[in-house]
Image: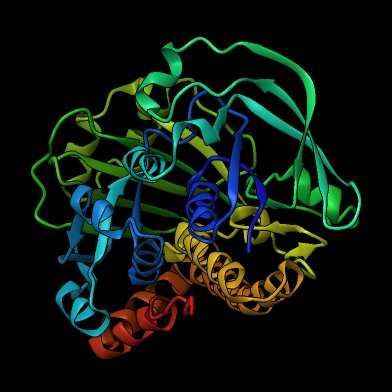
Amino acid sequence: MGDGAVVVGGGIGGLAAAIGLRQAGWEVTVLERARELADVGAGISLHANGMRALDALGVGDAVRAAARPQYTGGTRTPDGGWLARMDGAALEQALGTPIVGIPRAELHRVLRAALPPECLRIGTEAASVEQDGPGRLRVTVAGTTPVTSDISDLSNTPNTPDPTHTLDAHLVVAADGVNSRLRAQLFPHHPGPAYSGSTVLRAITEHPVALRTDFELTWGPGAEFGHIAFRDGRAEWHAVLNAPPGLRHADPLAAVRRRFAGWHAPIPALLDATRPEDVLHHDIHELTTPLPAYTAGRVVLLGDAAHAMTPHLGQGACQALEDAATLAAALATAPTVESALARYDAQRRPRSQSVARAARQAGRMGQRLSNPLAVAARNTALRLTPSGVTLRTILRHADWTPPARS
């Protein structure tokens, strides 16, 4: 099965979808609105379900080669006491692969390398999608011509402006993020994303930092600080805070230093190794109202466009990768596009929406919790929780197997 497909959005989910579609026999055009990828200064943890999806797409080994396994770490209190330890070896034994940490930009590079340069159109926006006869779609496009598949070249390569034009397609994948324009077009009565109550500041250190663990989270009242160690010795850190939407700081790094003053090592060292201009600041939005469907005709929603969730389980990108692998398998095995998309919706919507609910609840019991008595009760409960229970909680979301393609 296959003809022409347009993927709207060149993020992790969109690039993964393009890889899967090409494997299923489709000609693919990827439209990415930005000239530079968002979140180039951030990092990501990939659980076993995300890695299994990447394996199904044929790029798992390349991602592992660029990533650092996470075997040590856990959750701490601001004074450095441990609430729960992470047993990465036990996770690897149970799932066949450890959690890994990788810069987002590096993951993008791996995914782009699996696609031919000519299928990527950078700085190109899909304004609308319309039916254009049985089984055909017309995508209205404005922007620039394709330039390169190498992220490092994007800011230095001239793009030639194109007038508004249209692309014909037999399938459109809307992977255009939490503020998806295509989702709003397909579901005009859906309220769209809502502010979660949390904002995140994050960066990658300029140089390597001496760390004793691969991954940590520290919970204080209404705040979380975490780090992910990378293969080259640098690390990503993130600070998630309860805050009103739109709050910004003239000096974000100084604001983080003030908020986390007195918190345990290596937090001061991570901040000391960061350049002020590298700090990113984004409010966290989610789809608190679940979508009634992930498809509309031959348009399919994927990733944050379908199920934007809070980061408290580390599952956002993993769910997008699951989407991509599931869509590819459905298109490779179902007799028609319509039946493939129905299968995709049936397989992905219940699971991803369940994970989104679980992430929201994890935030309420973790970073979002601010009442001192409630924080103390939670900390006591975590310290008393057997490690096997913690392991089973992670397995509940990470133990996923891609659908067969035959």
Taking depth in this image into account, of 142 and 267 the one nearest to the observer is 142
- Residue under the image location 67 percent in, 59 percent down: 306
Q: How is the image coloured?
A: rainbow
Q: Nearer the viewer, residue 380 or 271?
A: 271
Across and down, in percent, residue 164 comes to 79, 21
In the visual, does 104 lie left or right of 161?
Answer: left
Say if 266 sits above or below 392 in the image.
Answer: above
Figure quadrant of residue 318: bottom left
Q: Is residue 177 depicted above or below 389 in this figure?
A: above
The answer to whether residue 368 is visible is no
Which quadrant: the N terminus? bottom right
Residue located 70% across and 44% down the image:
179
Q: Residue at x 51, y 31 (%)?
A: 118
Q: In this image, 145 relative to 44: left or right? A: right
Q: Is residue 37 left or right of residue 271?
A: right
Q: What residue lies at 81% left-to-right and 61% top-to-bottom? A: 296
Which residue is more in the foreground, 110 or 312? Answer: 110
Residue 80: where, in percent of width, then height?
19, 59
Q: Position of residue 338 (x, y in %)?
A: 76, 70
Q: Position of residue 373 (x, y in %)?
A: 45, 73
Note whether residue 282 is visible. yes
Q: How many marks?
A: 0
Q: Is residue 158 above or below residue 388?
A: above
